Image (spheres, coloured by chain):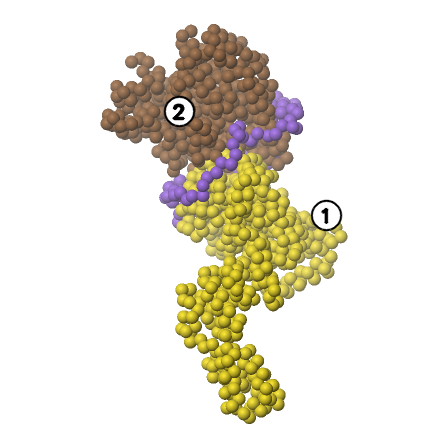
Amino acid sequence: MDNFFESAYSIAQQIKDNSITSKEVVSKYFDNIESKNSELNAFLITDKQAAIRQAEIVDQKIQAGQQVGTLAGLPVAIKDNICTDDFTTTCASKILREWKPPYNATVIQKLISQDAIILGKTNLDEFAMGSSTEHSAFGPTKNPVDPSRVPGGSSGGSACAVKTDMASVALGSDTGGSIRQPAAFCGIVGMKPTYGLVSRYGLIAFASSLDQIGPFGKTVKDCALVLNAISGHDPYDSTSLDIKSDDYLQYVDRDLKGIRIGLIEEFDEVLDVSLRENLESATNLFKQNGAEIVKVSLPYVKYALSTYYLIAPAEASSNLARFDGVRYGLRVDGDNVEEMMINTRTQGFGQEVKRRIMLGTYALSSGYYDAYYKTAQKLRTALISDFKKVYDQVDVIICPTTPTGAFEFGAKLDDPLQMYMSDIFTIPSNLAGHPAISVPFGTDSNGMPLGIQILADGLNDSKVIHVGSALETLRTEG
Amino acid sequence: MEMPANTVKNDIEDFLKDTGFEATIGLEVHCELKTATKLWCSCKNSFGNEPNTLVCPVCLGLPGSLPVLNKRAVEYAIRIGLALNCTVQNSIFHRKNYFYPDMPKDFQISQYDIPINADGYVTLPDGGSVGIVRAHIEEDTGKSTHFSASGRIHESSATLIDYNRAGIPLVEIVSAPDITSSEMAKAYVTELRNIIVATGATDGKMEEGSMRVDANVSVKRIQDSELGTRCEIKNLNSLRSLGKAINYEIKRQVDNILSGQKVVQQTRHFNEDLNQTVTLRTKEEAEDYRYFPEPDLVPLNPGAAWIEQIKAEMPPLLIERRRMVQDLMRETQEIDQLQSAIAILVDLNLDSVFKQTVGIGANPTIALKRLTNEAANAVEAARNLNPEQFAKLIQLETDNKISTTQSKTILSKMLENPDKTLDILISELNIVSFGEAETTALVEQLIKDKPDEFERFKQGDDKVTQFFIGQIMRLSKGQANGKLVTEILMKKRNQF
Amino acid sequence: MTQDKSFISKEQVLHVAALAKLNLSDQEVTKFTAQLSDILGYANELSELELKDVSPTAHPIELENVFRDDTVLKSIDNSKVIQNAPESLNSQFKVPPILDD
Ligand SMILES: [Mg+2]
Ligand SMILES: [Zn+2]
């Protein structure tokens, strides 16, 4: 079957129907891992034996007619900043090189309880700080469409694994675009759910008020399938929302009648020609199929990048303090405990992590807190109220996921500010805590995939799935 | 050389008078809450366990772990706030960032500009008052043990860390700088301790470290309006150390100023062996804590209804319990140091058995004396005294049926044998009642046997009085009531 | 991007590194001073905004009073706690001596 790998949803159905075994499926994916991973470096660690063993258990359950979970037998990849007690969890950092957590993240427990098969852990920018997966202590992941280019980041390994059929679906984390941007760069679907919809317990924090775990898939439907499994209230996460669960699969394959779609005025001026054309053709498809297009204004959105690069590093500087060589991970000795801590952190963290810790420490330090951190928090309020007004007028907003397609390795490494600009369209949703999805749409002048992003108000995850799925259908039909 | 406490106290008072200085002291008291679990996780809150056996990803600060607030800890913090006359308000948590190996996350979750309790006060037994600026919730750190041959930190070769204590809920009570002497500081800490222990939120054991005091001390010339530069003395773990550290610090700072130097803002440590405070770090090296709102926690808004419920379910406040005892003491004869006896009774949690006993009709003065003296040696048993039997015992003493000595003997047996009735105890102890009739009979017999001595007694030889009492005690095998014997003897002398 | 104005000095960079327990090489100090200055210069656009009456948002979602019951659950095995320790002794974490306390 040529398009066997194209739908995790259909694979799951076939496993459940007993028309294919999970063991066969897992083996197929491992064939790909074995032939592709050494070049692309999407996975940092896999465990074939354990995966096959798990698959056999699921197969036995199915053959015995027992009830199985919604992800039964499905091979899943996990970004390596999510704690797993069967695999090391490194955050792609030297400082956690051999760390094996004594516990599973809540999302891992949920995947296991739905009988998913965890293949291994995927590469990322160290501590999820970056937009290219170049900042991994274990070497970069390559873009499968053009291996001279970056896969995006920070969840580059997960995006690459799904694109190349090394995993059927994957989990990533998105703090400023780290799921959606690599999804766009690799030509797959990636979704950041509403803040609080998916538990963060066991996700190694980068910026706690922005981080959110979400799915990668080949299709919007696959993302909905995974979101069903991982969302829900978690008593171990105080910021987890205690709301009625929804079945996100039901929003796939609906029509667009009555849907109002917003275009952000302020983004017009920053779009180059090719991106504007790409957005226009998406807009036209929506319009032709019954959606109403509305121009909307988010006056404060142009400050989102500044706001983000004060808040995220500030929280990170505090979250990453615990990596001090005392309890786990790397230790580089010293004559006294303070020297030991300094030596450990100095040798354990890479350049980008240090840069952000420095930036965040400065933004919080005495005398600068009000000017930087507090001002950024006020901007956050202003942006949220902008969004509120817009969502009185429209159901969703659409915009490009990224300002360019995937760039070449090294292109932005020495200019962090340019690198940060990659997140200009994804950051606003993180600041507001809103859901957003990136759906592949069009290519840039280099033939690299581009993504269209669909944003919605908090807790309207169903709307981004609805409109994202519609765009996917229109793209393939058109 | 250690001087007796009184000498030191007088010394420092004289010293301040002579030099024209006065001291300003503010205290920060950390107390551990008596919850079943820690502040952010479900590990047991318990003292004295094997190292690192009461830990989990959360209290070890493992990557990916998140805190969830213990509801009971909030309830206890509110109890403390109410007992300290604070405003209980909506609050949030902040992170206080500094690196220290016994702090698992290298930041402490605490409350900063908006604490749960603010603006209260403590009334001292002498009528004075100390303001409470805030009483906020925060987490405890782990415990480090320093290794070395000499036992001195500066020469230690390694440090071992046990995180069992990490994450235990604390309330930090910050006083206003209303304290002016080490004596007042000790009185404040004692009273504060009694108040918060009575809420049931904490056990206030300074020896076990469940209550720790930091003292901020500054001095200034009496005529100056501005406060002097202050130094903070960390981790004082007994009233004794508190008093000594403050006195040492006052003297050190005044000496400093008198010799033309400036007091440098510092954090200091009280060295028990040297009996002096030593520099820990100066302000220039002091930390920049980079406080910011804890993003992993949400605001804490207890609301009027919950606060009311906590108030209703709270054990009665210390001050109310003392007042209740005081009310029962009215219309009775004055006793020495009544207030301090009442305070002891309540601190020992014997006010409830007292109230029941007096309620049955027992004499409050005798009940108070027995409970705060004899019974205080067996507090647990005393709390379980049968009020009826105890009241009967006091009645026998009140009616002069038994002597005070007999009464005390019976009470001590009663404490040891809670199931035995008063009658059984009396018969087991072979207590013979020497009331008016029995004693009179004995006295008359003695007068008959010793006519010469009685003659001398009548003529006013008081030495013979002692002889007669001694004789009667011997005849009664020590069970006669001396006071009653004297009374009857005097009556006889007047009759003849 | 070049700035007329430096938004952070080398001394400040060194101070921040000390607060964050990082040692920077001379080269890193120079590089970070320039890069942080760039980023802070960009973020300086916020300082021109009128935000006096805007309250800060620490959280994107409006939640309050999230509690846990005070019920003891099992802690993790001491061996699992210590297995990741770079150095340990008698079930405790062992570190080089602490200088000031
Ligand atoms: Mg404190
Ligand atoms: Zn714990």
Q: Where does label 2 land, which residue?
A: A228
Q: Nearer the viewer, residue C11 or A386?
A: A386
Q: Chain in brown?
A: A
Helix, strand or loop at label 2? It is: helix
Residue B116 locus on image (x, y percent): 57, 41
**Discs 1 and 2 share one subunit:** no
- Which chain's residue wears label 2? A
Kindly identify the residue that appears in the image at 48 percent across and 12 percent down: A258
Residue B255 locus on image (x, y percent): 69, 56
Kindly identify the residue that appears in the image at 66 percent across and 55 percent down: B128
Kindly identify which numbered label has been placed on residue A59. none
Mark 1 or mark 2, whichever is nearer to me: 2
Q: Chain in purple?
A: C
Residue B283 located left or right of residue A143: right
Q: Where does label 1 land, which residue?
A: B226
Task: Classify the position of the N terminus of chain C by image quarter.
Answer: top right
Q: Residue furthest left?
A: A64
Kindly identify the residue that appears in the image at 59 percent across and 91 percent down: B456
Give the Cα separation between the discs numbered 1 and 2: 64 Å
Q: Nearer the viewer, residue A26 or B197?
A: B197
Hue of chain B?
Answer: yellow
Amino acid under label 1? Glu
